[in-house]
Amino acid sequence: MSKKTYAGIPEEYSKLDSAKIVLIPVPYDGTSTWQKGADKGPEAFLNASENMELYDIETETEVYQQGVYLADAVTENSSPEAMVDAVHQATKKYIKRNKFVTAFGGEHSISIGTIRAFNECFDNLTVLQIDAHADLRKEYHGSKCNHACAVYEASQNTNLIQVGIRSMDVVETTVMDKEKTYFAHEMAIDDTWMDSAIDQMTENVFITIDLDAFDPSIMPSTGTPEPGGLLWYETLDFLKQIFADKNVVGFDIVELCPNDTEKSSDFLAAKLYYKMLSYKFQNEGVEDEFDNSFDNSNLNKNTNSKFNEEDEY
């Protein structure tokens, strides 16, 4: 993936030192089991972003002016475990620099690394998973870092809330907290699910969005499309409330599986990413100093972490 600025923004808004936002592309597709191509997702997302209007009508902002640094892609693919470790280290490096860190995959296994980093840096973390699939297997195809295991670790170590679920294996029922799971078939007839989910969140929230959470009528280009998914405005409604009520500390978006003949999915992913940034920063002036309020004392609380504060990259 050639180096460029995010969305073609002027270079003055793309420098690491002054940017409030960091975007980490992770073009990884090592464990997906049906349609391949998620490794092409970041490039398709970035290409679509270059053709997107940068004024957000709803928030009346141009969030790119807060500064968006496009980090080098994490290209480690020697094993799922090595990839997760590389994502974890890259994510944590930028959190430590007091950036609002985001990532774009790649398949959902990349989120094991992003979530691990945020959980080490923020107290009492809620992980909001918006997804068609439960992804709660402890191990799959010989690895704990498979895409089917994307939030198992989060289920054990964070306040995991799952939204949009409509496909899972029976073994995952033994792990799932059904009080904090919002199944698509129930959401379709329940007007209170958004408020209920937000009430269950702690103050610090990390959001992981698998694009197959969306209905395939608006997001066909994903590796495992499932009927009965979320639509655009209800999803934005939910996200807008979360950003207003909670401290969203970062997010990732995964599982764009682009194809040559259908570009609307690429553009949906681009708009979704920009919308989430717009919600996060809509009340913050460009000149305001950003403080993501991570707790330095947490940086090494996970003894399994291979990351040391002295590490330089």
Image: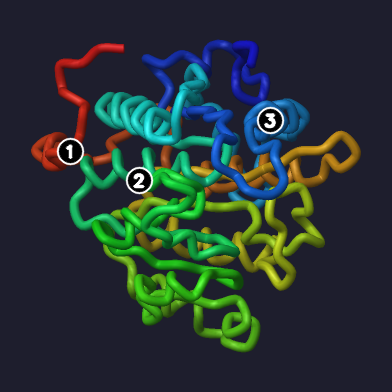
Q: Say few, some or many: other residues with alpha carbon within 10 Å of mark 1 (under 14 / 14 to 19 / 20 or more).
A: few
Question: Label for residue 40?
Answer: 3
SS under mark 1: loop
- Asked whether the viewer can see residue 220, the reply is yes
Q: Which residue bears the numbered disc 1? A: 304
Q: For the N terminus, give its image quadrant.
A: top right
Q: Position of residue 57 (x, y in %)?
A: 68, 47
Which residue appears at 11% of the width and 41% of the height? 301
SS under mark 3: helix
Specify the quadrant of the image occupied by residue 151.
Answer: bottom left
Front-lying residue, 173 or 300: 173
Q: Which residue bears the numbered disc 2? A: 115
Which of the marked residues, 3 or 2, is nearer the chain's N terminus?
Answer: 3
Front-lying residue, 146 or 242: 146
Instruction: Please report contact status of discs 3 and 1: CB closer than 8 Å, yes or no.
Output: no
Q: Position of residue 75 (x, y in %)?
A: 51, 21
